[in-house]
Structures are given as C-alpha cells and as structure tokens.
Image (tube, rainbow, N blue to C red):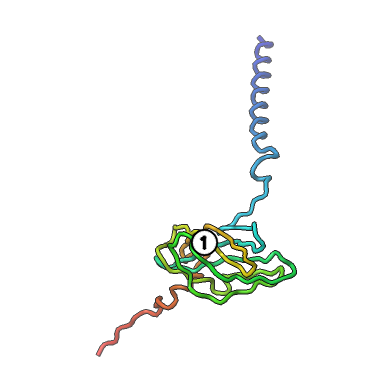
Amino acid sequence: MLTRSHRRRTALALGSLTLVLASFTGCGLSSATNRAYTPAAGAVRVESQVKVVGAVVVSAQEGSGTFIANLANSDQSAPVSFESLTDVSGEATAADFTAMEIGPGGMLNLAEDGGVELTGDFGPGDALDLTLAFSTGDQVDITVFVVDDDGFYAGFDGSGDAETDTEPETETGD
C-alpha cells in the first residue's frame, strides 16, 4: 500500500510540475511583452519623410475642434513645410493657416503652436480621415480620433475660444 501511495504522490507531483511549466511557456520569447510597441494616445504614421506622431482632433463642442500632432522631419539636411490639412470624407474643413516650417531633423509640436482649427459634422468619438500635405509634395493619409477637450487634452481646442464665455454672469439689482 505504501508503494501505491508513493506512486500516486509522484504522479500528482509530476502533473503539477507539468501544469506549472505549461503556464510558463505562455510567457515565452514570442510574447507581446517582448515585441517592440509604442503606446500612444493619438494616431501615428512614420512611412514618409515627415513622421506624424500623436495625431488627434481635440473638440470642446460638436462641429468644431483643433488638430494637434507632432511632426518630425527625418531629412537632416533640408527643411520642410506643413502646408495643408484636408478631410478625405468631407466631414471637416480646416481653417486657413500659414505654412509651418519644420527644420532639418527638427520637430513641430502643433499643440504648442495652436494646432489647426476644423469645423464640420463631427464630434468626440468620431474618426476623421485626414491628409497632411508638405512642401516636398509628400502627403500623409491618417485616420485620427476626435477626443474631448478634457483630462490630458484639456485646453488644446482653440476653435471654441471665441464662443466660450468663462466669466459668470452676475445680476445687479436696482
């Protein structure tokens, strides 16, 4: 009977060891934690000379918003200018803006420069198919999400500044 009990314990121990080893193989060399990954809140496009990183449209109200992104010039010898922004679907129209230069090997942070104002039939939660055009003739097509002007993006929507009244109204009695 001791032999049978010993075999049973050995079998259980080997079975447990097999389960433990099997669970570790799920975290092997090909797991997602070992692959390159760039977490970003906004859309990313890096296939052209100008890399577009963290692109979103920040919207404080339906029908308007501000496009922001980081634009990086990978050409180390010549500047490039961001010249236009268009919506492929026609849901949004970009306000006119002066071309913005990105120096050789430089970066342009549109959030710091006020972004590009958009108006149209969109609001937070929507996605817009935008095309950015540059002085080199390159165009970058990118789908960006419209996010609320709240939390991390609070204050980035410059499109509603004129309409937003932040002063409380006070009544004066006679």
Residue 162 vs residue 170, the one in the foreground = 162
Q: How many marks?
A: 1
Residue 154 vs residue 83, the one in the foreground = 83
Q: Quadrant of residue 119?
A: bottom left
Taking the image as shown, residue 31 lies to the left or right of residue 116, namely right
Can you name the residue that lies furthest to the right here?
Answer: 77
Can you name the residue that lies furthest to the left here?
Answer: 174
Looking at the rendered image, the quarter that the C terminus falls into is bottom left
Residue 112: x and y in percent read: 58, 73
Task: Identify which residue is drawn at 50% across, 59% down.
Answer: 129
Residue 27 vs residue 109, the one in the foreground = 109
Can you name the residue that lies furthest to the top here?
Answer: 1
Residue 66: x and y in percent read: 49, 69
Q: 20 above or below 61?
A: above
Q: Quadrant of residue 170?
A: bottom left
Can you name the residue that lies furthest to the front here?
Answer: 137
**Amino acid type of the residue that numbered disc 1 sits on in the rendered structure:** Leu
Looking at the rendered image, the quarter that the N terminus falls into is top right
Residue 126: x and y in percent read: 44, 58
Q: Quadrant of residue 32?
A: top right
Residue 91: x and y in percent read: 43, 62
Which residue was labeled with disc 1? 130
Q: Regarding mark 1 in the picture, which secondary structure is present there?
A: strand
Task: Identify which residue is drawn at 56% across, 65% down.
Answer: 132
Q: 13 above or below 134?
A: above
Task: Identify which residue is drawn at 44% across, 62% down.
Answer: 90
Label 1 crowd bin: few (<14), some (14–19), many (20+), radius 10 Å: many
